[in-house]
Amino acid sequence: MLKIQEIREIIKLIDQSSIEKFSYEAEGTKIVLKKSPIGQDVPTAMTPPVVQATTPSAPAAKVAQPIVQASPVAEAVEEVNRDSSLHEVTSPMVGTFYAASSPDTDAFVQVGSNVTNESVVCIIEAMKLFNEIEAEITGEIVEILAKDGQLVEYGQPLFLVKAK
C-alpha cells in the first residue's frame, strides 16, 4: 500500500507532466489520478488532479487536491529576498527535509555557517532515496526556512544565503 507522502509525490509528478490519467493497483487497492486536458475551460487558474481511491471493502471516493496559496510567511520571505542580495537555496524535488545525516549527528549547517558552492546543506529524502543538496553559492547561511522532518515542495526555499 502506498503511503500518503508517496501519493502526494505522484500527484505532483502527474500535475507537472502532460499525463492526463494515471492508474495504480496493488493488493486490492486502486488509485486513479485524472486531470483536465490543457485548453479546457475551467473556472480556476489551475485544475488540481482528482484522486480516486478504492479498496475491496470501501466505495470509490473522489478527493480534489487543494490549490496551495502563498502564506504571509512565504510572502515576507520573498519580500526580504527582493530587497537584499540574499540567495535562496531551493528544493530541487518534493520530499522530506533533513538538516543532518542522522538524528544523532549535528546539522550540516546553522545560521552563521559559511558555505561554498559544493557544501552539503541538507538532505531531501524522496521515494526512499536520500539526496544531498549543495549550497551552489559561496556565502553565509542567514536563515534556515525549513524544519527538520518537514515535507518540502519542488522549488520551495530552504535557506537564505548572503553571498560573499
Image (tube, grey):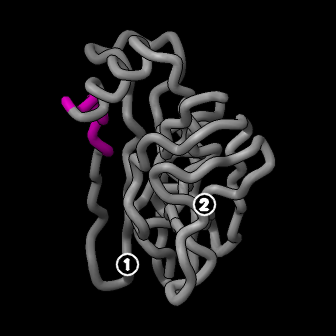
Quadrant assignment, res 124: bottom right
Side of 124 where 68 appears, left or right: left
Magenta-span inclusion, residue 43: no
CA distance for labels 2 and 1: 37 Å
What's the residue type where badge 1 is placed?
Thr
Mark in front: 2 vs 1: 2
Main SS category, magenta section: loop
Q: Amino acid at mark 2?
A: Cys
The circle on residue 16 is none
Spot occupied by residue 74 in the image (x, y as percentages of width and height): 30, 32
* Residue drawn at (30%, 35%) of the image: 68
Helix, strand or loop status at disc 2: strand
Residue plotted at (46% across, 77% down) = 29
The residue range painted magenta reads 65-72
Number of on-image labels: 2
Q: Position of residue 131 (x, y in %)?
A: 71, 62
Tag 1 secondary structure: strand
**Which numbered disc covers residue 122?**
2
Spot occupied by residue 143 in the image (x, y as percentages of width and height): 42, 44
How far from the left and from the top, in percent, is residue 162? 55, 31
- Seen in the picture, residue 126 relative to 75 is either above or below; the reply is below
Task: Return the mark for residue 55.
Answer: 1
Q: Is residue 70 magenta?
A: yes
Nearer to us in this view, 113 or 32: 113
